[in-house]
Image (cartoon, rainbow, N blue to C red):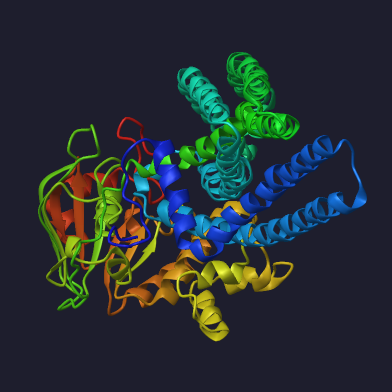
Amino acid sequence: MATTDERRPVPGGGAVALALRLYGRELIRLRLLALPALLLPAVGNIGIRYVAPLLVAKLAGQAAADGGLTLAPALPYVLGFGAVLLLAEVVWRIGQHCLNRVGALGTEHLYVLGMDELLAKDASFFHDNFAGSLTKRVLSFGRRFEDFVDTVTYRIVGSLVPLVFGAVVLWHYEPLLVAGLLLMIVLTAAGATPLIRRRQALVHDREAAVARVSGHVADSLMNMETIRAFAAERREAGEHRSRVAESRRLTLKSWDYGNLRVDTLVAPMSVLTNVLGLLVAIAFGGPGQGVEEIVVAFTYYSNATQIMFEFNQIYRRLESSTTEAAQFTELLRDPPTVLDPAEPEPLAPRDTGIRFEAVTFAHEGAKPIFEGLDLDVPGGARIGLVGRSGGGKTTLTRLLLRMSDIDEGRLLIGGQDIRRLRQTDLRSLIAYVPQDPAMFHRSLRDNIAFARPGATDAEIHAAAAAAHVTEFADQLPEGFDTLVGERGVKLSGGQRQRVALARAVLRDAPILLLDEATSALDSESEILVQDALWRLMDGRTAVVVAHRLSTVAGMDRLVVLDRGSIVEQGTHTELLEANGAYAKLWHHQSGGFLTDPASPPDA
């Protein structure tokens, strides 16, 4: 995820231009396959479209000169005609073989690049984007490369290179034929360019609408239980229909603009070009070669102007592939703000002590959460962070993980500024258990082993036993091989938290961050897991966020946060004796949780 990684493109320019640059980079990377893939089909087209018709034209000229056809003079042309077609077919097939591999290898690499780019994004980026929309964008970025290469190979290079060959042959017969052809192509391109620019904006709007449809579908599917609980199926279906209708409206608008405007210009110009070519050939054809020249002019002009007839189709294919890719490359123009240093320090902390020195932090566009915060956590100490919601407890843990960067001050681990370390090195020091642990749609075993992929089955089972996962895992249909469902929907909240704790045990990191790690546990499970947590914290630096004050009462030190400031510090006993903010929180608890000060505690 470092910005120094050579695979990461440098953002800049328009999104479509960046997509073209990335696709071009792939062709350069695969040049040993890409060159024959691009050129051999064009060579085959030269044979089929221009060399073979040239032989037919010469045969017609020979027949006109001789007053008819006989086998002997016609045989070389006929055999040459067949040889050209056969050779063109062989060459074309070899080119297609290379092209298939270029498409597959390029798509694979772009899939990987796309995922790398998403993984490099800041945590805030994923808060602002639909997962479904991002999925569509990154997959389209890779998949559309194959369409792009096909269009460039068969429609552009495969037509333009033969056109150059045809122009050379036409010049040999009559230079005015070439001049007329080039003039009509230039006039057509000049007239179509402003129309294309307008169409690009329409296609961008169309693809954005399609991405919104994908995002809404994914968002609805991930929250299906909430939709059913609130009987909101019709409302969601109506919202979906509205988004689909908008997508359809923008799609038809972009298509109609291209078909009605561009085709209206190109089609008459193509017909006019063919007529012009025939008139020039007839007017300037010399004696004895009139038939041959007319056949060449008619055939070559027909082949050349086929590009003009297919112009809109070619452009639409190219436009579709690059515009869809641009939906992803737009994301690259907003680079991450949490970056690895250009010259990172090696990970060599003196200890596992944590120190916040005059730390100031604010979310973008918001008031500062912390201003000049100082906090010292000695190595091996167990610290509890308490206080009402919004005090900054979870934000402290996220800053320690470098999910966001502080604005001012320093954050040190073992004397090392964490901004001087690689993010992967920093996070290797930390085992993190969030309040709402994320589960992958994988087996229970895989979800635990995610903390340390090389762990043995024995180590996984030991971690599961320590976090009391084994007790419910043995009841699952396939034990540790049971799929837990998307986001772990097959597990209860308490079970998911036990799995997250098992990950922390397996991680075996020197620093432990727990953010409400036992909030979803029932009382019986909490007693068991608390025992496992105390054993896990032994010998480690532990920072524990808790609303249930009883879970942190035995910590070495409690830090009370209120609106981003530390208002009290001390042991549970010391803070109760001080009769300050902590004591007030303790007495406002009901069942071990903090209650709203405006609400009386339960009886």
Percent of width and height locating residue 265: 59, 15
Choose between 553 and 98: the one closer to the eye.
98
Foreground pick, 413 / 252: 252
Q: Is residue 482 above or below residue 260?
A: below
In the depicted view, which residue is nearer to us: 33 or 396?
Answer: 33
Evaluate whether residue 494 shows in this view.
Answer: no
- Tally of numbered tags: 0
Return the residue nearer the eye: 537 or 489: 489
Which residue sits at x=61%, y=45%?
158
Question: Is 600 displayed left or right of 539 in the figure?
Answer: right
Asked whether residue 458 appears in the rendered view, the answer is yes
Q: Quadrant of the C terminus?
A: top left
Figure check: 73 above or below 440: above
Q: Is residue 28 left or right of residue 337?
A: right
The vertical placement of 342 against 163, above or below, is below
Q: Is 228 left, or right, of 265 in this rendering?
A: right
The N terminus lies in quadrant: bottom left
Residue 128 x %, y %: 41, 37
The percent coordinates of residue 207 (x first, y second) are 54, 30
Q: Position of residue 592 (x, y in %)?
A: 38, 51
Q: Is residue 226 left or right of residue 554?
A: right
